[in-house]
Amino acid sequence: MQSRFKQAALFSVKLLLSVGVLVYIARGLDLRQLRDHLVSVDPFLFVLALALIFLQTFVLNGRWELIMRALGVSLDWLAGWRILMISLWFNQVLPSSVGGDAVRIWLLRQRSVQLSKAIKGVAADRFTALIGLIALMVAGLPFLLSRVTNQAALLAIGGLTLAGVAGTLVLLTLDRLPKRLIALPAIASFVRFGTLVRFLLLQSERRGLLFGSAILIHLVTAVACYALARGVGAQLSVVDAGILIPPVVLLTAVPISISGWGVREGAMVACLGLAGVPSEQALSVSLLLGAISVIIGLVGGVIWLASPERGSYSADKAAKAAEEAPGFALGQGKEASSHP
């Protein structure tokens, strides 16, 4: 009972934050102009963005399959894609304390995958995506410095990038700490997780394909946002999209709102504003991207309705199965690994 109360309280806080940020952003905008942008978006470019985000799920599944194979788990491609799509249904359409990652772990357990490997596979998939995102932000810093004059924004994005680099390096080198620290229960699981990710990125046979797919996924998101921006008449270049969308994705991944709603809109308005995109157009891009995520989630919902595991599903069991995952809280936000 107490656990459910905490879950309900957390959900309420996230909901209030999402609504509060959206209301705060909308107060300073021309809502009629925003509505015009949304209803007059170029249908071809919207469908193009939708197709890109949908095709992105296949790349996401391919990356996850590589990780599971490295763990010794043979995951059928179609089965993996089905699990991924179902997780997006939970993550996008039915946000709760039990996110899509918990459902992924639970569904793997239904396929007799060991709990430890299921947790490692999902957590490593998340963190690999995060590393790809940070790498893209590092690569974009020189372009950012040459195109943006707002010093506060440069410091914010630069600081966010450096913090990501530092955090990644710390996690990947935790096993270099003194043995007495590594043995502590609170650190030991992160040490094992960091060692796994380091193996995947530096020693596994498919490391190039794995890291490349992690970067490609975020580039696809940037191109989809570029298409949406052009669809509402915004003068956004491909280069600016490639530089400014990754920070939006990273901030959206922070699990403090409902499926990233509110946080994504605030970040999108702030970041695209650096490229001269009016707030109304930037917000419409974010809302359209959110709508696409919901559409993709609905596809996952249809798959879930036809899933044989649906009859035995329990939110409590799914949450319990995922509690041991290092950094699992990241999975409760909008992923840095898939749709922003």
Image (tube, helix red, strand yellow):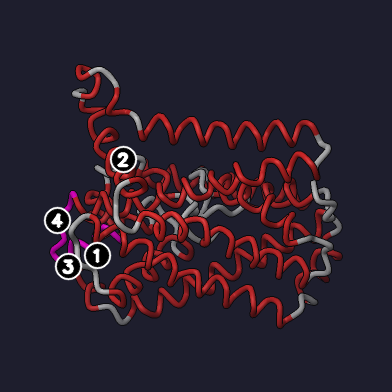
Q: Tell me if mark 3 has few (under 14), some (14-19) or many (20+) residues whose alpha carbon lies within 10 angstroms of its own.
A: few
Q: Give the spatial CA distance, label 2 vs label 1.
A: 19 Å
Residue identified by numbered label 4: 114
How far apart are the two marked residues, 4 and 2, measured between alpha carbons?
Answer: 16 Å
Q: Report the amino acid beneath label 3.
A: Arg
Q: In which quarter of the image is the C terminus?
A: bottom right
Q: List the residue tagged with mark 1.
A: 107
Give the camera-side residue of 147 and 280. Answer: 147
Within-10-Å neighbours for mark 4: few <14, some 14–19, many 20+: some
SS of the residue at dot 4?
loop
Residue 89 percent coordinates (x, y): 42, 68
Residue 30 against residue 85 in the figure, above or below: above
Name the residue beneath numbered marker 3: 111
Residue depicted at 79% across the width and 42% down the height: 146
Q: Which amino acid does label 4 sit on?
A: Gln
What crowding class fits label 2: few (fewer than 14 Cα within 10 Å), some (14-19), or many (20 or more)? many
Which of the two marks, 2 or 1, is nearer to us in this view?
2
- Residue type (three-letter) at the residue carrying disc 1: Leu
The alpha-carbon separation of the residues under discs 3 and 1 comes to 7 Å
Name the N-terminal-most of marks 2 and 1.
1
- Side of 72 where 172 appears, left or right: right
Reply above or below: 161 against 252.
above
Task: Specify the quadrant of the image occupied by residue 308.
Answer: bottom left
| Residue shown at the point (41%, 60%) measured from the top left | 209
> Would residue 106 appear left or right of 58 to someone viewing this image?
left
Q: Where is residue 125 in the image (x, y as percent from the top left)?
A: 36, 54
Q: Do the residues labelled 4 and 2 touch (CB within 8 Å)?
A: no
